[in-house]
Image: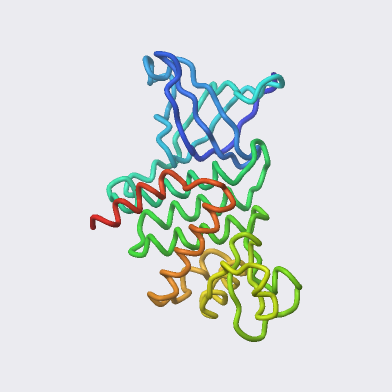
Amino acid sequence: MSIHKTEAIVLRRFDFHETSLIVDLYTRDFGRLSGLLKGIRTEPDKFASSLEVSSHNDVIFYKKTNTTLHLVSACDLKDNFFNIRRSLLKAGLMGVMMELVASVMQPEDKNEDIFNLALECLKELETTNSPEKVTTIFKIKILALSGFKPHFDSCVSCSNRILGQSKFSLSLGGLLCEKCYYKDLSARSIFRGTIASILYIEKNNFKNNLNLGLNPQIKKELEIILNAFLNFHLEKELKSQKVLNKLAAHI
């Protein structure tokens, strides 16, 4: 076993036996990994963090070679993002972000840009009056940074530049030009403003993206398209998104 120290964001946590805890972490230096914290539930003072979901921590762990579950020996809290948890909406959106990282990123596949993106979004989510916008930016950026993004630069079928109208194909994972509509008869129409917004967010940094204006029509279409794309290609609906949708229906 080798010992390592890194920053980590908690994605998920599970009780293990009667005394311990297993956490899924997204780390700056090692990507997504799972850690076992022995005795934390009966002796919480052994660790300087309660490892709430989305919390930002410094962790020390023993990296094992014969298993994907590593032993966490120390954990110091850097930020618990308490203000996010005070809002039902923000807490729900935070849950979507954490579950999306856990679903998209492969174990121990380091991507420091995604770590920084998640941390920036959590910090912004604490204070913003537009939490849905932060989550929309996060979804678009993580898909782009992970290589999982839908194809919006040209026609996904013929690769030609799209000059006129286009449709979005879930099954093919991108835009179809008018000549290629027949490739997917279930493809849906999409506003040019929605395409332009996605391309802008993909190419610009997080702070610049916060200044991007999104009218209600484009915001709604972005939500529909991104969620449909994720559901189709992950072959499941994110549990946290399902909960958030139910919450929105009762507001």
Q: Is residue 98 above or below residue 127?
A: above
State the residue at coordinates (66%, 78%).
177
Residue 46's spot in the image, x, y percent?
Answer: 43, 19
Residue 102 versus residue 48: which sits nearer the camera? 102
State the residue at coordinates (76%, 73%).
158
In this view, the residue farthest toward the bottom is 164
Q: Quadrant of the C terminus?
A: bottom left
State the residue at coordinates (50%, 55%).
120
Relative to 244, 173 lies left or right = right
Residue 157's spot in the image, x, y percent?
Answer: 73, 69
Residue 155's spot in the image, x, y percent?
Answer: 70, 73
Q: Is residue 54 above or below residue 161?
A: above
Q: Quadrant of the N terminus?
A: top right
Relative to 245, 225 lies left or right = right
In this view, the residue farthest toward the left is 251
Question: Dividing the picture into quarters, in which one does residue 176 lie?
Answer: bottom right
Q: How is the image coloured?
A: rainbow
Residue 19 versus residue 100: which sits nearer the camera? 100
State the residue at coordinates (50%, 29%).
23
Q: Is residue 93 above or below residue 159?
A: above
Residue 84's spot in the image, x, y percent?
Answer: 34, 49
Q: Is residue 102 above or below residue 118?
A: above
Count of picture labels = 0
